[in-house]
Image (cartoon, helix red, strand yellow):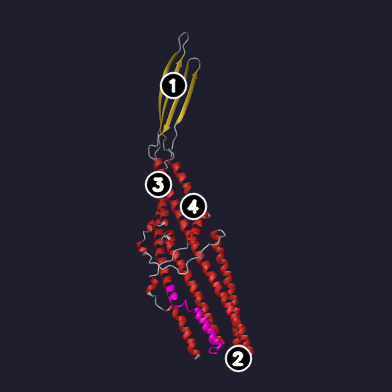
């Protein structure tokens, strides 16, 4: 009788991970994020130093773009006076202007414009990364808190069992071996509780480090998401912010090549002046005439042809282009892998939720009743009781894993913010 009951209980726990995925579970829709949690996340994104630093980078890039949009050269005012003794005096007023003949201003603005695009994409990355870190830390915090609660409950039940076993041992209804086994199990349960406390403290520290010492006002929903995610093949990889940063860097590098090439050609300076020349001769009236002058100057790129700068800029552009290709491969692989991890975790959670989540308390009550009635011995009771707690802990771990893989997928596909809003 005892062996039959033990076998049935063992089969029950084994079925948790072997049962197939029910169709109606896949049709379940995601519960919305609690509005209080959404508001809290927005506040963190607004106030977090990492986001503010990224926003400052964007403002700096905007200012730099305004700088590069300004004309390269200002006009020059020239005032001249020449006195040749008592015979001749010349006064002159002139204006000169260097002309951006080759479009250097436009090329430099192209660099700044690409750098602004990169800064905006880095801001998007910072936001989605911080949001993912926040939600994953929250999931880990909840998992550790639940695990600690289970460990404490296990200690409580083991303590009650030890007290019961001690009374039965003193009455001669329990062997010394079973009594010692109960005491050892109780000691192991307390050690597990201590480890759970330490893990909870670490998880809490990680969450508080992100939130600035504030705990979220709401938790994640009990039922993790079961959504029909789009296939990774349907996502345009080039639109993801990581590749947008790399694409902008490539564009900026190409613009620097244009700048370097245009710097090889000197810009001319045109000048215009007007003045008055006075001559003096003995016994003659003063003679005055208007003097008009034109000036053209062109630097000669003889000693420095600026070819080396072009070579450097071209090599940098090639490097960034190859980095873009490599990054695209990595991002495509990340999309595929994160999607597979989420689908695997979703299947495992569905199996657990369908078969293992509802009968644990009933099982513990049944075990206690069987032990008190003498139908199972102390060792069987302890083993099967510990199995219920191990199963419950596995469910918590599966739930945390599902949330984490879900957030990883949303972050990889750059749809985390949209999911939070909708």
Residue 260 visible in the shown view: no
* Circle on res. 204: none
Q: Alpha-carbon distance for marks 1 and 3?
A: 44 Å
Residue hosting label 2: 173
- Taking the spot 60% from the left edge, 76% from the top edge, the residue there is 190
Mark 2 or 3, nearer chain start? 2
Nearest-to-viewer mark from 2 and 3: 2
Nearest-to-viewer mark from 2 and 1: 2
- Taking the spot 60% from the left edge, 73% from the top edge, the residue there is 194
* Circle on res. 275: 1
Q: Alpha-carbon distance for marks 2 and 4?
A: 71 Å
Residue hosting label 3: 255
Residue hosting label 4: 54
Task: Give above or below for 22 relative to 302.
Answer: below
Mark 4 or 1, nearer chain start? 4
Task: Give above or below for 258 relative to 340.
Answer: above
Observer-nearest of 50 and 155:
155
Looking at the rendered image, the quarter that the C terminus falls into is bottom left
Q: Alpha-carbon distance for marks 4 and 1?
A: 56 Å
Q: Dot 2, crowdedness within 10 Å: few (<14), some or many (≥20)? A: few
> In the rendered structure, which segment of residues is drawn in magenta?
348-376
């Amino acid at each position: 009788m005892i062996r039959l009951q033990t076998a049935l209980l063992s089969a029950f726990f084994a079925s948790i991970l072997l049962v197939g995925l029910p169709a109606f579970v896949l049709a379940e829709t995601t519960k919305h994020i609690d509005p209080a949690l959404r508001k809290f996340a927005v506040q963190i994104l607004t106030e977090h130093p990492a986001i503010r630093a990224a926003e400052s980078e964007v403002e700096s890039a905007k200012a730099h773009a305004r700088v590069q949009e300004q004309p390269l050269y200002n006009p020059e005012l020239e005032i001249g006076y020449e006195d040749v003794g008592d015979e001749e005096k010349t006064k002159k007023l002139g204006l000169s202007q260097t002309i951006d003949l080759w479009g250097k201003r436009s090329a430099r603005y192209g660099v700044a414009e690409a750098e602004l695009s990169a800064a905006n994409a880095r801001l998007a990355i910072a936001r989605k990364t911080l949001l993912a870190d926040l939600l994953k830390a929250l999931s880990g915090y909840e998992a550790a808190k639940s695990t600690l609660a289970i460990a404490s409950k296990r200690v409580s039940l083991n303590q009650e069992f030890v007290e019961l076993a001690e009374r039965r041992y003193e009455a001669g209804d329990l062997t010394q071996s079973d009594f010692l086994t109960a005491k050892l199990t109780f000691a192991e349960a307390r050690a597990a509780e201590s480890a759970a406390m330490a893990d909870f403290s670490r998880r809490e520290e990680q969450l508080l480090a992100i939130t600035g010492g504030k705990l979220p006002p709401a938790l994640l929903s009990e039922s993790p998401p079961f959504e029909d995610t789009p296939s990774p093949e349907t996502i345009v990889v080039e639109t993801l912010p990581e590749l947008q940063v790399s694409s902008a860097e490539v564009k900026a590098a190409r613009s620097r090549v244009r700048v370097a090439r245009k710097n090889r050609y000197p810009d001319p300076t045109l000048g215009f002046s007007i003045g008055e020349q006075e001559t003096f001769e003995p016994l003659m009236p003063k003679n005055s005439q208007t003097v008009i002058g034109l000036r053209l100057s062109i630097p000669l790129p003889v000693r420095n042809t600026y070819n080396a700068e072009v070579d450097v800029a071209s090599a940098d552009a090639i490097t960034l282009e190859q980095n873009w290709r490599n990054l695209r491969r990595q991002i495509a692989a990340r999309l595929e892998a994160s999607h597979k991890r989420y689908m695997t975790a979703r299947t495992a959670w569905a199996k657990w939720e369908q078969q293992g989540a509802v009968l644990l308390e009933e099982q513990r009550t049944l075990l206690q009743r069987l032990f008190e009635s003498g139908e199972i011995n102390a060792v069987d009771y302890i083993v099967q009781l510990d199995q219920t707690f191990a199963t419950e802990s596995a469910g918590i771990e599966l739930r945390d894993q599902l949330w984490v893989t879900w957030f990883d997928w949303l972050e990889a596909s750059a749809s985390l913010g949209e999911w939070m809003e909708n």
